[in-house]
Amino acid sequence: MPITFVGIGLYDEADITLKGLEAIKNADLVLAEFYTSKLMGTTLDKMERLYGKKIHLLSRRDVEEGADDILSNVKNQNVVFLTGGDSMISTTHIDLRLRAMEQGIQTRVIHGPSIYSAVCGLTGLQNYRFGKSATIAFPYKRHVSEYPYDTIKVNKEHNLHTLLFLDIAERYMTINQAIELLFRIERRRKEDVLKGVAVGVARAGSESPVVKADYIEHLQKYDFGLPLHTLVIVGGLHFIEAEALIKLADAPNEIEKEIL
């Protein structure tokens, strides 16, 4: 029997595609994990009512350490595995799919709306002008990971934008907190990497997402409201991107100085 990986989108239960909904309705067992991405505009109960199936929620440990248990269910059942965003963005999901294939299990992927494409659509930044992305995590035992800062530095050297995911493991990081962590690293290293424009996106996929662009020191003071938040550190701007940020993200006209 097959296992079908279904991305269910960005914000609520209605983001799912018709193909994804059909796969769920035909499934014998529906599994889901929401530790890599969470849909803030819905609940498990609402999803089950719309999809017409019981959803068995898995923890991170269930997925990363219990892959064999998950795949054992596939041998006699048609299984659907739900994830927020797109179904194959996370390395964890790719690993599970590869394990299934190694066991001779047929796999299928049904894509869903992703923050990668949503950020471009909401901000007007061009997708091919993004470099490597990174995740900003809350400090662990007072240690702040410098990996996101280094990623921004490398991308800026090539005039590329950096998409930054914010920690959702134990609590939801805000754009303001993320910028403060980046500034903490910059002050310690006495560098000048962060200077320039940044863009914050909150609640992508909802009826009223918040999109705001400004110079990063000003953006840090902006109230983006409820989660989920995403941050973009802008490299050099194409003139169309600058115009889009001014019109779509309420950026100041001064950002035209950043045009390449």
Image: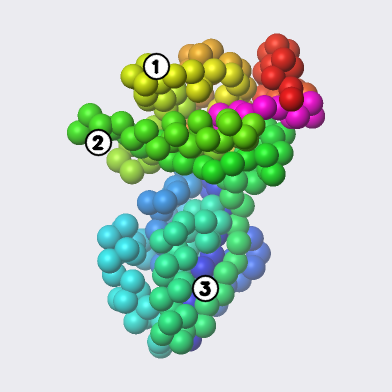
Q: Tell me where residue 32 sits by quadrant.
A: bottom left
* Distance in Å between CA atoms under marks 2 and 3: 35 Å
Secondary structure category for the residue under label 1 = loop
Label 2 amino acid?
A: Tyr
Q: Is residue 187 above or below residue 77?
A: above
Q: Are marks 2 and 1 in contact (CB under 8 Å)?
A: no
Identify which residue, 187 or 67, lies in the foreground.
Answer: 187
Identify which residue, 131 or 171, lies in the foreground.
Answer: 131
Residue 87, horizontal then vertical, whole percent: 53, 61
The count of marks equals 3
How many C-alpha atoms fall within 10 Å of the one at disc 3: few (<14), some, or many (≥20)?
Answer: many
Q: Are marks 3 and 1 in contact (CB under 8 Å)?
A: no
Is 246 a magenta residue? Answer: no
Residue drawn 61% across and 52% down? Answer: 113
Residue under label 3: 4
Residue drawn 46% across and 27% down? Answer: 175
Q: Is residue 177 visible?
A: no
Label 1 amino acid?
A: Lys
Q: Which residues are magenta?
A: 230-241
Secondary structure category for the residue under label 2 = loop
Residue drawn 61% across and 28% down? Answer: 234
Residue 93, horizontal then vertical, whole percent: 45, 63
Label 3 amino acid?
A: Thr
Secondary structure category for the residue under label 3 = strand
Q: Is residue 228 above or below residue 259?
A: below
Identify which residue, 29 or 258, lies in the foreground.
Answer: 258
Is 235 a magenta residue? Answer: yes
* Distance in Å between CA atoms under marks 3 and 1: 49 Å
Residue 140 bears which disc, if any?
2
- Give the left or right position of residue 259, taking residue 173 as reference: right
Residue 190 bears which disc, if any?
1
